[in-house]
Image: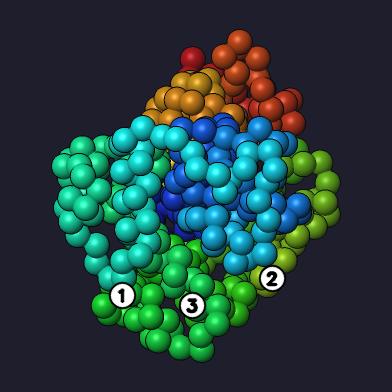
Amino acid sequence: MSIFRTTCGARVSNVRGMSELDEARWTAVETRNADVAGAFIYGVRTTGVYCRPGCRSRRPLRRNVEFFATAADAQLSGYRACTRCAPDEEVRVDALTSGVIAACREIERTRGDVKLVDVASRVGFSEGHLRRGFRSVIGVSMATYARESRASRAREILRASSSVTNAVFDAGYKSVSTFYDGGASQLGMPPGRYRDGGHGEVIRYTTLDTPLGIVLAARSARGVCSIRIGDDEATLEKGLAEEFSRATIERDDEGLSDVALVLADAVHGEGGSHELPLDLVGTAFQVRVWEALRRIPRGEIRTYAELAAEIGSPRAVRAVGSACGANHVAVIVPCHRVIRSDGTLGGYRWGLEVKQALLRAEQTQLA
């Protein structure tokens, strides 16, 4: 896993799921951004159809979507072309976008280290101009695209390989250490466990009674990984077991007494929840949102639009709302501090009454 851990509210996450590149691609699909047509293709598993970004067909669920560099790649995976957006037809783009797409194909073709200045020269732009244009069109830097393209090859090879070492070199890495420093972090878990499904996690939990109801807190070996709020302890325990269906779940009230104390203070609007190390599971975009949430001072609120602007994605207001809804660590990652632009509370996974109570407690303490 990619692990960023401190105990002072900086980056404290294990990131699983979409890479930064896939996150940018999914945002383009969600917003139907036709400006990046030609840069990639997405396939929808439930329909067997592949489309270009900007397609006006019904928006698919994220879990049903996979991404491809080209239409040919999608066809090799058994998808057929969408009749609505005609992704096989040539699309007209401006010169810079055309150069960026050509750079994508060059990076995908190249194994090992990519010299970006050579890529820029081959597509007819200065390195600086292409770098800026690349990030604007694709949503990630050229270096990130190269790194994640190589990591994607490693993932595909690892699924069919019995040797991590062979997969590392076949994917274009020059050493195993380089892979672990860069590519392995894109796998979502250590390579050996990636092949066997990630079994072996031990999740310990405790519960406490609070004015909000029963709060269940669970911790992995790396940090707090789940906080759930409700009225029925058995239901919360069942939800935890479903959330970590392949892990060993153990109750440990004594071992998690420190977590319980911090949570008891937090639900009263007090204390420093940044003291707890976290094990957050989410996409790169979600982690950016969660980290921004932790920077909101206790007793203050932000709108979804303000939070989107703060993380540098002002158009991704809906995606910010989705990231708040996907937060697994209630109260400690304070998604309750985000409301709609019209002043209404918006949604909250554990109920609007709980959200209102948390805000009221924090504002009372601040006063």
Q: Is residue 251 above or below residue 126?
A: below
267 sits left or right of 169 in the view = right
Three-letter amino acid code at disc 2?
A: Arg
Amino acid type, residue under disc 1 in the picture: Tyr
Residue at 31% over, 51% down: 103
Q: CA distance from mark 2 to mark 3?
A: 24 Å
Q: Are marks 2 and 3 in contact (CB under 8 Å)?
A: no
Report the residue that reaches farthest toward the front: 89
Q: Position of residue 272 (x, y in %)?
A: 45, 39
As drawn, is 187 to the left or to the right of 256?
left
Q: CA distance from mark 2 to mark 1?
A: 31 Å
- Can residue 363 be seen by looking at this rendering? yes
**Residue placed at 35% from the left, 41% from the top?**
98
Q: Position of residue 167 (x, y in %)?
A: 42, 81
Q: Which mark is first along the chain, 1 or 2?
A: 1
Foreground of the two, 300 or 263: 300
CA neighbours of label 2 inside 10 A, class few (<14), some (14 to 19), many (20+): some
Left/right placement of residue 167 relative to residue 325 reads left
Q: Amino acid at mark 3?
A: Ile
Q: Which residue occupies 43% across, 30% down?
A: 313
User: Residue reaching furthest top?
Assistant: 342
Of the two numbered discs 2 and 3 on the same chain, state the one appearing first in sequence: 3
Which is nearer the N-term, disc 3 or disc 1?
Answer: 3
In this view, the residue in front, 121 or 135, is: 121
Depth order, front residue of 172/186: 172
Give the labeled residue for mark 2.
Answer: 246
Q: Residues within 10 Å of mark 3 (few under 14, many from 20)?
A: some
Label 3 belongs to which residue? 157
As helix, strand or loop, the secondary structure at mark 3 comes to helix
The residue pinned by badge 1 equals 173
Q: Does 30 appear above or below 65? A: above
